[in-house]
């Protein structure tokens, strides 16, 4: 097992980071939140989990060991593969997931693309005794993950985050348009577009549209 990769960031895409390790570029699948914290040319260390399939070897990367552990625990539930587990961590922090499961928060799980009401109910039952209680190390005030601010315009950041979570480009564009007034109001008040809050609002818009 590859427990982590460490080295300069060679390339970034909405869902993939390429980390140079000993002269070899390791392609690592990451959540939009993790991608947003990386910068090309800067050193990075990602906890990783290698998923082996008959026709592929896929390396998934995480900000820390706790996130990786939750990623692996989520896959012990029936019907949860690595992509869905990563989507869950793209929307919720590890502690937010623990809180949702421990309190039976079905709505929090249906905020994840690919999880419907029945699927959420099933996951709550299967994961209840696996994830444990919140550790108090993550953000609990908001269940959705925050996307760190970066040099890219907020619209591009938000669109890339939504596409990385599994939404189609058209859906992402519609969600960005829906939250544009909120972003413009923040900018007009002398601040910057609050991307984490905008992501939460965009996800709520998409959930209502289902």
Image: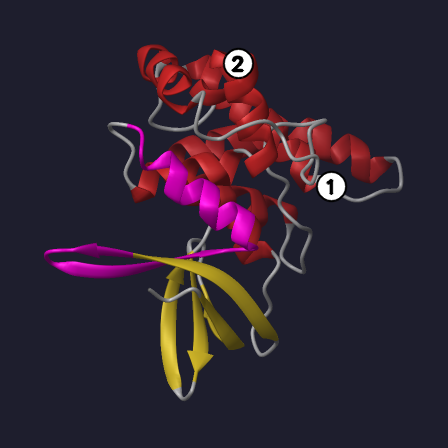
In the rendered view, does 163 fall on the left or right side of 32?
A: left
**Residue 103 sits above or below residue 161 on the image:** above
User: What sort of colour scheme is used for the picture?
Assistant: secondary structure
**Residue 172 sits above or below residue 201 on the image:** below
Q: Quadrant of residue 98?
A: top right
Q: Secondary structure at mark 1?
A: loop
Residue drawn at x 52%, y 26% as measured from the top left: 203
Residue drawn at x 59%, y 27% as measured from the top left: 133
Residue 53 lies in the magenta-colored region: yes
Rendered-image quadrant of the N terminus: bottom left
Q: Secondary structure at mark 2?
A: loop
Tell me residue 60's x, y (percent). 38, 56
Residue 105 lies in the magenta-colored region: no
**Residue 197 sits above or below residue 19 on the image:** above
Q: Quadrant of residue 134?
A: top right
* Distance from the alpha carbon under mark 1 to that under mark 2: 29 Å
Tell me residue 62's x, y (percent). 50, 54
Asked if one can make out residue 170 in the rendered structure from this viewpoint, the answer is yes
Choose mark 1 or mark 2, whichever is in front. 2
Q: Find out whether the residues at labels 1 and 2 contact each other: C-beta distance under 8 Å.
A: no
Query: Circle 1 sits on which residue?
Result: 193
Tell me residue 139's x, y (percent). 69, 35
Asked if one can make out residue 166 in the rendered structure from this viewpoint, the answer is no
Q: Which residues are magenta?
A: 51-77
Give the numbered dot on residue 105: 2
In the rendered view, does 32 fall on the left or right side of 183?
A: left
Pointer 1 local density, CA inside 10 Å: few below 14, some 14–19, many at least 20: many
- Judge by depth and name the residue closer to the eye, 187 or 146: 146
Rendered-image quadrant of the C terminus: top left
Residue drawn at x 47%, y 49% as measured from the top left: 68
């Amino acid at each position: 097992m590859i427990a982590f990769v460490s080295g300069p960031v060679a390339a970034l895409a909405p869902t993939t980071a390429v980390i140079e390790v000993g002269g070899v570029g390791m392609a690592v699948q990451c959540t939009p939140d993790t991608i947003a914290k990386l910068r090309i040319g800067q050193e990075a260390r990602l906890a990783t989990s290698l998923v082996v399939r008959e026709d592929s070897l896929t390396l998934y990367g995480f900000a820390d060991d706790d996130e990786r552990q939750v990623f692996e625990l989520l896959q012990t539930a029936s019907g949860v593969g690595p992509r869905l587990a990563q989507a869950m961590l793209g929307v919720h922090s590890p502690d937010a997931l623990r809180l949702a499961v421990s309190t039976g928060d079905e709505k929090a799980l249906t905020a994840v693309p690919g999880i419907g009401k029945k699927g959420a109910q099933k996951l709550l039952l299967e994961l209840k005794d696996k994830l444990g209680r919140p550790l108090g190390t993550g953000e609990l005030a908001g269940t959705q993950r925050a996307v760190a601010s970066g040099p890219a315009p907020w619209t591009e950041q938000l669109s890339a985050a939504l596409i990385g979570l599994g939404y189609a480009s058209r859906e992402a564009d519609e969600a960005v348009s829906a939250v544009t007034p909120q972003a413009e109001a923040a900018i007009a008040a002398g601040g910057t577009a609050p991307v984490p809050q905008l992501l939460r609002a965009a996800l709520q818009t998409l959930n209502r549209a289902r």
